[in-house]
Image (tube, helix red, strand yellow):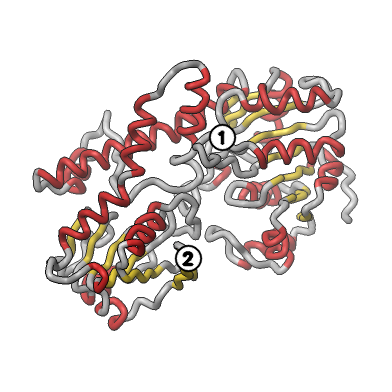
């Protein structure tokens, strides 16, 4: 174990997933010692083998983390006794009733308590409803005898990771910080100013938590609006993609959002429901969130109904072969969490439709206890299917080949725009 002489330059990051691992990389770039903790043994094993499990990291990137000599990993929380700052980035999913599931977050706090030292800073980055840090985390720490703002410093800072996008570097995205006390906020700001180019302090942890909820709720509602406009445009024989492109020429007052097969990932389908749950505790019904969820939940079935209409009507469904392109929830990543493509495929399989898929980021997937493998995209494979359905518009897909060889294409992402010989393409 490396001895740390300057604890101010060391952090422990709990949760080495889509949020935690990029933070590890950034802290190491800023010459910090980093102790990574994850209770998922498979992740730790991958890291030991210098193998990546995230699409944004190559094996070479993982190797570079360890070549610094300042990255230590494990499943044991005793690693945090070496550091001055603990950052928690564990998942906060929904339970089976669509209520917040803070099991991983609470487990991280309770597991950390035996190793906490006075003066340490604890930063929560996991997405959660306003009030979590103050109402759920603070009392647990105080029950163990720590006074927040004096013995321990507790802040919330919403993660703003966008897997797959390359335009903005992590350190260029402004960092929101809200503490339980002013001293807590100051401690958080001081730390994050060493790795982020802009830090934005807010008046409380609740404000910081609400900021994250509002960001993703806005996206849910606007995407849902476009999905409703899609249905109307289809009835009126209007190309919704052309409409959005035209509206986007307005230099102010309009932000383009796009329709699609539904919303996936850990943020947009989850965070607004955290906010909905919290609002109902105050007898407030956030109707736009409820309706938006319903619109997006209906999208996979809407797609299937559209698909059935364009298929040759003389062929029984149990003889139809569908090729799905892309099963992740967004392009250029390997994340299938809450992906609408999986529900779309599940519904087709339940109708006895033959379904194959190609995704360069996901080699295999299990649906309805059936293991499916990504097939090779050659001329024979494409041409042997009655219809190719594009659900995720990965950039490294040979769309021209799909256009050339597919008997029929149902494009839900406008991915074939600009490719020639489009007479066989039906847009969402």
Describe the element under mark 2 as helix, strand or loop. Answer: loop
* Marks 1, 2: nearer the viewer: 1
Which residue position holds label 2? Answer: 361
Question: Residue 267, how many percent across, how many down?
Answer: 49, 41
Question: Residue 258, how many percent across, how many down?
Answer: 29, 45
Residue 57 located left or right of residue 98: right
Describe the element under mark 1 as helix, strand or loop. Answer: loop
Determine which quarter of the picture holds residue 154: top right
Q: Is 87 located above or below residue 260 in the figure? A: above
- Disc 2 crowd rating (10 Å Cα; few below 14, some 14-19, many 20+) is some
Residue 423 located left or right of residue 346: left
- Which residue is depicted at the point 31% across and 41% down? 257
- Which residue is depicted at the point 27% across and 29% down? 253
Q: Which mark is residue 100?
A: 1
Question: Residue 11, how many percent across, how many down?
Answer: 76, 43
Label located before the other in sequence (1 or 2): 1
Question: Residue 22, how many percent across, how many down?
Answer: 61, 50
Quadrant, the N terminus: bottom right
- Disc 1 crowd rating (10 Å Cα; few below 14, some 14-19, many 20+) is many
- Which residue is depicted at the point 47% across and 33% down? 273
Nearest the camera: 182 or 54?
54
Determine which quarter of the picture holds residue 51: bottom right
Q: Which mark is residue 149?
A: none
Q: Is 47 located above or below residue 384 in the figure? A: above
């Amino acid at each position: 174990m490396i001895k740390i002489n300057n604890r101010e330059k060391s952090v422990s990051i709990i949760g080495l997933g889509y949020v935690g691992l990029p933070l590890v990389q950034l802290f190491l770039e800023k010459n910090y010692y980093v102790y990574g903790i994850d209770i998922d043994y498979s992740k730790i094993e991958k890291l030991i083998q210098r193998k990546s499990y995230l699409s944004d990291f190559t094996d070479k990137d993982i190797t570079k983390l360890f070549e610094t000599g300042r990255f230590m990993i494990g499943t044991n929380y005793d690693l945090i006794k070496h550091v001055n700052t603990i950052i928690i980035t564990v998942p906060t999913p929904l339970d089976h009733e669509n209520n917040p599931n803070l099991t991983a977050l609470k487990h991280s706090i309770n597991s950390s308590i035996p190793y906490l030292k006075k003066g340490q800073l604890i930063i929560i980055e996991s997405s959660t409803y306003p009030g979590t840090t103050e109402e759920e985390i603070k009392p647990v720490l105080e029950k163990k005898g720590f006074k927040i703002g004096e013995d321990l410093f507790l802040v919330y800072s919403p993660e703003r990771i966008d897997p797959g996008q390359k335009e903005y570097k992590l350190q260029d995205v402004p960092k929101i910080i809200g503490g339980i006390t002013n001293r807590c906020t100051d401690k958080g700001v001081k730390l994050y100013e060493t790795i982020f180019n802009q830090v934005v302090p807010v008046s409380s942890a609740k404000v910081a938590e609400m900021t994250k909820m509002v960001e993703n709720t806005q996206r849910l509602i606007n995407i849902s609006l476009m999905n409703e406009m899609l249905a109307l445009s289809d009835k009126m024989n209007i190309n919704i993609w052309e409409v959005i492109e035209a509206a986007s020429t307005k230099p102010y007052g309009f932000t383009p959002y796009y329709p699609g097969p539904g919303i996936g990932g850990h943020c947009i389908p989850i965070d607004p429901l955290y906010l909905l749950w919290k609002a109902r505790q105050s007898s407030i019904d956030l109707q736009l969130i409820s309706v938006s969820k319903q619109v997006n939940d209906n999208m996979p079935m809407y797609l299937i109904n559209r698909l059935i209409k364009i298929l040759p009507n003389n062929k029984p469904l149990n003889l139809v072969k569908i090729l799905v392109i892309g099963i992740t929830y967004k392009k250029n990543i390997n994340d299938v969490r809450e992906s609408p493509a999986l529900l779309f495929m599940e519904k087709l399989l339940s109708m006895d439709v033959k379904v194959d898929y190609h995704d360069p980021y996901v080699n295999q997937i299990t649906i309805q206890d059936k293991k499916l493998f990504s097939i090779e995209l050659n001329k024979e494979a494409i041409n042997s299917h009655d219809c190719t359905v594009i659900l995720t518009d990965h950039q490294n897909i040979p769309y021209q080949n799909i256009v050339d060889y597919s008997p029929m294409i149902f494009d839900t992402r406008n991915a074939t725009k600009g490719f020639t010989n489009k007479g066989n393409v039906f847009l969402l």
